Each structure stands twice: as structure tokens, then as C-alpha cells.
Amino acid sequence: MSDKIERREDVNPEEGERKYGDVEFADPVNNKYPVDTPEHVRAAWSYINHKDNAAKYDADEVKKIKKRIRRAAKKHGVEISDE
């Protein structure tokens, strides 16, 4: 599994920072899927598990993002499905 997530052409990383501030993102390259609060962790998990959102990444990238979301969920005491 690659540690690198590719820069997406359909995303402006500055938009994520503008919207959420200087927070931790499960996709820090594109500033997608903030995981700084329990609410954001739940939302990130929900969004990355939508087929249309996951389809914007390759399989290794999705695994990496999910791993980061799971780590944040544990940190924030959030239970998420095994999906």
C-alpha cells in the first residue's frame, strides 16, 4: 500500500482549509475528510463509504483514508462500522 495520496484535479485543497481551518484531514493532500471532532469523524466515515466518493481514489488510497479515519475514531471514542 502506498503512503501517498495523489493530488486530485477536481479539488482545491485551500477550500478544505478555508472551510474547516487548520485541522487534521484523513486526506491531507487534498484537505478532504476532516477528522478533528467526533462529528467530523462520523461524517468522514460516511462519505468515504459512498461509492461515488471512494471512486475518486484508487483502492490503496481508500484503504489509507479509512485507516486514518479509524485511528481518529479511536482517538475520539467514536464507534464506526467495520465497513
Image (cartoon, rainbow, N blue to C red):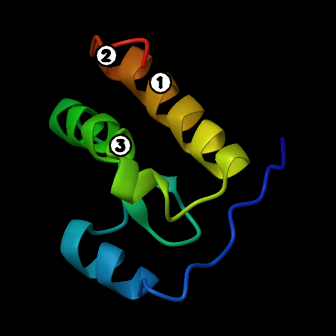
The residue at which mark 2 appears reads as: 80
Mark 1 vs 2: CB contact within 8 A = yes
| Percent position of residue 18, x then y | 26, 81
| Percent position of residue 67, x then y | 58, 30
| Mark 2 residue crowding within 10 angstroms, few (<14) / some (14–19) / many (20+) | some
Residue 39: which disc? none
The image quarter containing residue 64 is top right
Report whether residue 11 is seen. Answer: yes
Mark 1 vs 3, N-terminal side:
3
- At x 69%, y 71%, the residue is 6
Compared with 56, 50 (above or below) is above
Circle 3: residue type:
Val
Residue 70: which disc? 1
Mark 2 vs 3, N-terminal side:
3
Q: CA distance from mark 2 to mark 3?
A: 13 Å
Q: Is residue 51 left or right of residue 64?
A: left
